[in-house]
Image (spheres, rainbow, N blue to C red):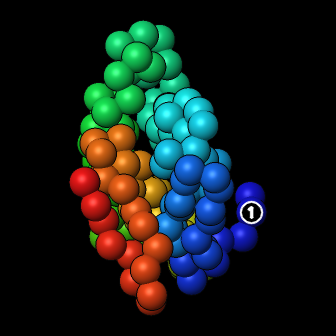
Amino acid sequence: MRAEHPWPRAERREPNGFAPPGWPERVRPPGAPDWELTAVEFLLDCCPADYRRYRLLRRHPVVLARFAAVFVEAHERASRDGLAEVRVDLTGHVEPEVIAGAVEVWSQQLAHLARMRREVGMVEDALRGRRFVPTMGALSPTR
């Protein structure tokens, strides 16, 4: 597993494309050639494996993005619930250091899911027509 950084990644530019900070590394910038193909593969990787069998999701990336967003948000809610309950659920069944380790795992998972939710949201916005443009010190969306 690669190390995650707390700071946003730098913007990326390609001819005809711009990726703002926080854009998923595996997805080419919006406007770059074949960027939607890389977006579809990224979104499918954010979903349960059986979503790959639905041709509609591959043919309609905006629909796939909505499915991915709903799935990631639900996963994030479930992980929050797991973190909230882990101490009570495991007390008396495992040692306190194991519980502390489980809390750490839930915390890491929540951080990962929060990043994924932001990335999926950015890709979904781009698929819906939002364009990110570099400006001095900030990003301005255009439609």
Location of mark 1 (residue): 2
- Relative to residue 38, is residue 108 depicted above or below? below
- Residue 16 drawn at (x, y percent): 56, 50
Quarter-of-image position of residue 105: bottom right
- Residue 75 drawn at (x, y percent): 36, 49
For image coordinates 30% across by 65% down, the residue present is 141
For image coordinates 55% across by 77% down, the residue present is 8
Q: Identify residue type, mark 1.
A: Arg
Q: Secondary structure at mark 1?
A: loop
- Relative to residue 56, is residue 69 depicted above or below? below
Asked whether residue 106 is in view, the answer is no
Q: Quadrant of the C terminus?
A: bottom left
The front one of 6 and 12 is 12
Q: Residue furthest front?
A: 15
Q: Residue furthest bottom?
A: 137
- Residue 30 drawn at (x, y percent): 49, 48
| Tally of numbered discs | 1
Q: Quadrant of the N terminus?
A: bottom right
The front one of 99 and 70 is 70
For image coordinates 52% across by 25% down, the residue present is 49
Q: Is residue 29 left or right of residue 123?
A: right
Q: Is residue 141 left or right of residue 132?
A: left
Label 1 Cα neighbours within 10 Å, binned few <14 / some 14-19 / many ≥20: few
The front one of 102 and 64 is 64
The front one of 100 and 29 is 29
- Residue 57 drawn at (x, y percent): 38, 20
Asked whether residue 108 is in view, the answer is yes
Q: Is residue 79 left or right of residue 96?
A: left
Quarter-of-image position of residue 33: top right
For image coordinates 40% across by 62% down, the residue present is 132
